[in-house]
Image (cartoon, coloured by chain):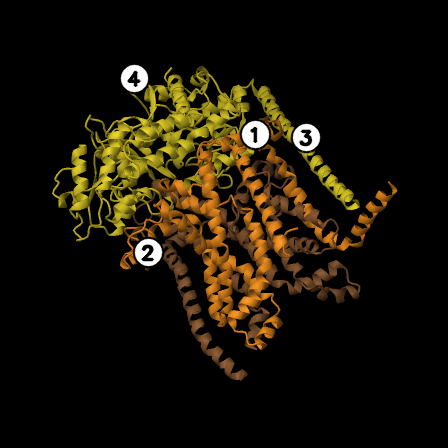
Amino acid sequence: MNLRRKNQHVNKIKISDMVIYLFLALFSLTILFPFWNLFVKSISAADAGIVDALQMWPKKISSFNYKYVLTNRYIWSGYRETILRASVGTVLSVTVTAMGAYALSKKNLPNRNLWTTVVLIPMFFSGGMIPSYLWMVDLHLINNRLALILPGLVSSYNLIIMRNFFMAIPDSLEESAKIDGAGSIRIFFSIVIPISKAVLATVGLWVLVGHWNAWFDAMIYMRDADKLPLQVVLRRILLEGTQQMMDLNSTDTNHITPDTLKAATTFVCMLPIMCVYPFVQKYFVKGVIIGSLKG
Amino acid sequence: MRKKVVSILMIAVLCTMLFSACSSKGTSNESNGESVVSGNVTNETKGGVTSETEAPKHYEYSMAMRNFGPWDENPEMLVRWEEEYNADFNLVYVEDAQGADQINLMVASGEIPDVMQYVDMNKYYQDGIIGGWTEEFFREHAPNLSKYIDETDPSAWQIAKFDGELMYSIPCFRLYDTIATPVVWRTDWLKNVGIENIPRTLDEFEDAFYKFAKNDPDGNGKNDTYGLSQTGVRTIYGAFGSYRGKWLLDENGQVVYGDVKPEMKQALEYLSKWYADGVIDPEFITGENEGGYWAITHKFLNNKIGYTNMGSFYHWLPDMSQYKNGTAIGEMTAQWKNSGNTGTYAMGYAPEGPNGHKGTDQADFRKLRTVFSADLVKDQERFGRLLEIIDDMNCSSVERSVEVNRGTIGVYSDIIDFEGKKAFVAIGDAKEATSLNAFCSTMGAANTFAFIEEGGNLEYQKVAYAQQFVWADEEFKDKNNGYVSVIFKTPESRAKYGAELDKILNEGYISIITGDKPLSYFDEMVANWYANGGEQITKEANEIYANEHK
Amino acid sequence: MKGKRFKTGALLNQYWKHKELFILLVPALVFYIIFCYIPMQGIVIAFKDYKLMQGIWGSKWVGLANFKELFSTPSFFEILKNTVWISFLRLVFGFPAPIILALILNEVKHARYKKVVQTISYLPHFLSWVILAGVFQQLLSPSSGPVNAILTKFGIGQIYFLGDPRWFVFTIITTGIWQGVGWGTVIYLAAIAGIDPQMYEAVMLDGAGRWKQMRYITLPCLVPTITIILILNTGGILNAGFDQIMNMYNEGVYKVGDIIDTYVYRRGLEGMQYSFSTAVNLFKNVIGLGFVILTNSIAKKMGDSSLW
């Protein structure tokens, strides 16, 4: 009886699976389409004409755009700075956020509502660019790499979401440790962190990508050209390329079109961060559910 | 209860921390201010000590110049000029797109560069950040520049006098802006629909547009072409003696905003008829450019329209690589050549209206590029010396200007003969560089010392862009006169009303053209415009006009 | 008096008892004080005529003049209406989209396929709207775009997605979903990964199919996350997506597409208006905070997940 029912399900599943797979395939195509087009742009030669949104193959392939971007002398220091700020920034952010979130998730934290409010207010009110800049001058953080990490160390949004995940952890898990005499700090690091990898990975990913894409802070806080992150370097390359429109050295075959250059910088910037995904995904996909469904 | 007390306590602790931070901030700001002042004092005393010797005194200048990119460490040209002029130039690099914000931040933190570009000059003048000086002082320290201004257009003196008396910037000129925006025709289309000559009058234009839209000019058998799109539309206004976005004089000599001049109604009558007849590309609202560099008209490239007013003349500059020093090419030309479009095009004339009016968009060729901090200007000796340096660098001779902008002659640059005219040419490493501007920027040339527009006078600009102007002078001779605003300064209350007023006009113009609103709506729109701040702006525009024409 | 001191002492005792918890919170609090609360004094420039040279405290007080200027803008109600309407549609259609996608992805058994689709779906998050706007302008062009070519084939006729006020908002919402849906799934996938597998086993024993598993286990387990994100998102009710609209709108669709941020941006082009833009931000955020408090109290009444 039970077996037959299961078989019926298998048949049903196949049809619904088909629908799901087809839908996702179409969805992926709509995304890949413009990406492929962008890629075509990035490998198109300047003298191959305009690449329009429908063109799926370059008329003339050239690595000129990538060469132009990658031979910029600040590009590698840009990568270095971005990786530095992104890795250090992410680790610090996730740690401080998770600690704060855990504390706020506990009902027995004194003045819990007050502290929650303290965390929430900055989501809505901030001084703006000028006061923040003046304050950074006073803190002597101008041209200091910490200026790219500290001001955005904790995001209230992330903290609240993490807090919510921690709140969902059943108390029973922590009880036994408490009985063993472990304090909150030890419980947090040895019990809570290991079972919260999914949300830590999520917030980590958000912070990481935020750092990766950030440029404005570096532009106003950093002075040395070799301390500028990738995004600022790429912006400069693009700007240079656009100003080249009136450049006396630009000939038909030797000139940069902003379109193709922009496409190339997009890929130069995106590829490394794309490689991070599989590592992050591991924490969701390897979830208990898949295993249990298979079993 | 007890909880409340402790909560209050906690808040109190927070507040004290906040307040202490505030107060400490206040004092540190003050000390910032002091340090700036004392810095000047030391400079002054330095000047005083050395003032007895004859050689030019040694001064230091911090400068935020509009460069193409950051500089090398100890850039070659900078080192040369520092030695030659016995001065220290401390360059502050600010990004082009965010330049104004970055300098605002520096000013807010009390670290004001002596020399500033990018900034909102009028605001800086009103806030007392920049300094003003007399014309006599300027004439004394910058004789070459003074002569240049006198000979080119003496009206430029007045635009630099923000308060009507003192000069707050150096008037200068840009050769590029002496040529109005081009109108371009598909000549093969004209031939295909049986029109022999490039149209001159509005009637001829109308005829050509209708044939482009109806007679399948590209011969592909499809009804997929139009006469004109976004940029073409704006040239039509010129045929009626007005232009959108320009301040113009009416018959009584009053300054009026072009968009609300009554002549516009006639232009709109034509345009709405054309739109209804399918002559204007219905996508004219989103424009001819489909992303990427702004001056590319995809509609024109892709055989959708046969007439355009996109970009400036130099975007249409032909490939000049056949000349021995010719390298430049216009962006549109390059795209056209490479797109594989086998059609032909030619520069045309702006449409001439029933009353003989015609013209396209043209920017004012008078410019103000650089301003100086109030502290610097107050220090007359230091500032006077800087004016002397500027005068020599930017305006003493073509050779000097070439070296300032393009590097040492004989190493990076040379002056040769091109079609009987003097022309700059890049040599050596500069010639090999992918981008000349970027290359020159890093070594302290390009715009590093461009205190006036293009870093040199018109004579220099003719040499620097020789090939472009040899072509343009020939191509655009007597073709188009442009509509230039009669006032230089932007009316102050545009900051307050501008967004609203533009919205009224942009929406109104589009809805009249597309037929959403009848032609009679024009009068309502104009009344609306005046009522929502247009009156005030117009009043200010007339005051500015009076001041600029003293 | 004595009692009070005793009670104060009791709370201090609480702090002492849970000092480890509080210590965990301290780094975050220090951060908030130094990098959020201290610069927050800059808000006063909303009530001042800020001048760079005079500084924040030295500039002249103007009271509510900057706010009055905003409210007296003739098109203020139009841009407010547009902003709220676009935000509202984003909440109604854009908010559930990643949840649905996450649920669908959760149903994919083929692990590699799932991974690939997930990775692809994140991609648009890395494209700036400057680039995307160009792509969409060409894709959606009435005369030459493929989307309209398909529509014409089906006899629907040409639609001017970006230039027709009747279609503009639809286009903004749809392309917005397209861009953000994949990135939005991340948090829900994390939440799904945290569901106790025993719960599924229990209903599977009862013979529940996938639909029922989703309906009775996955979705209810997601509710707390959904609620919190929804509450937080209502705070952005007056931020309708500046970057996207800035790059996609045009004069023809101001009527429906001009939002507070784009309007203020155009205004700001005429020179530095720090006081005005601070005032606008303050207005937007006070309203946002109001919405968060409102939705929070509704959520509190309906269930147990809320901010406070």
How much space separates mark 3 and mark 4, taking CA atoms?
A: 57 Å
The tint chain B carries is yellow
Closer to the camera: disc 3 or disc 4? 4
Quadrant where the C terminus of chain A sits is: bottom right
Is there one chain holding both mark 4 and mark 2?
no
Closer mark to the observer between disc 3 and disc 1: 1
Residue tagged 1 = C64
Secondary structure, mark 4, is: loop
User: Is there a contact, CB below 8 Å, between mark 4 and mark 1?
Assistant: no
The answer to which of marks 2 and 1 sits earlier in the sequence is: 1
Q: Nearer the viewer, mark 2 or mark 1?
A: 1
Q: Is residue B155 visible?
A: yes
Q: Hey, what amino acid is under mark 4?
A: Asn
User: Label 2: which residue?
Assistant: C147
What residue occupies the far front of the structure in this picture? Answer: C301
Q: Colour of chain C?
A: orange
Residue nearer the viewer, B212 or C172 = C172
Provide the residue designation for mark 3. Answer: B27
Q: Amino acid at mark 1?
A: Leu
Gap between marks 4 and 1 measured at Cα: 41 Å
**Disc 3, disc 4: CB below 8 Å?**
no
Label 3, label 1: how far apart the Cα atoms are: 28 Å
Whether residue B443 can be seen here:
no
What is the chain identity of the residue bearing mark 2?
C
> For the residues tagged 2 and 1, is the chain the same?
yes
Chain in brown (letter): A
Please give the residue where the numbered disc 4 appears in the rendered image: B252
Badge 2 amino acid: Val
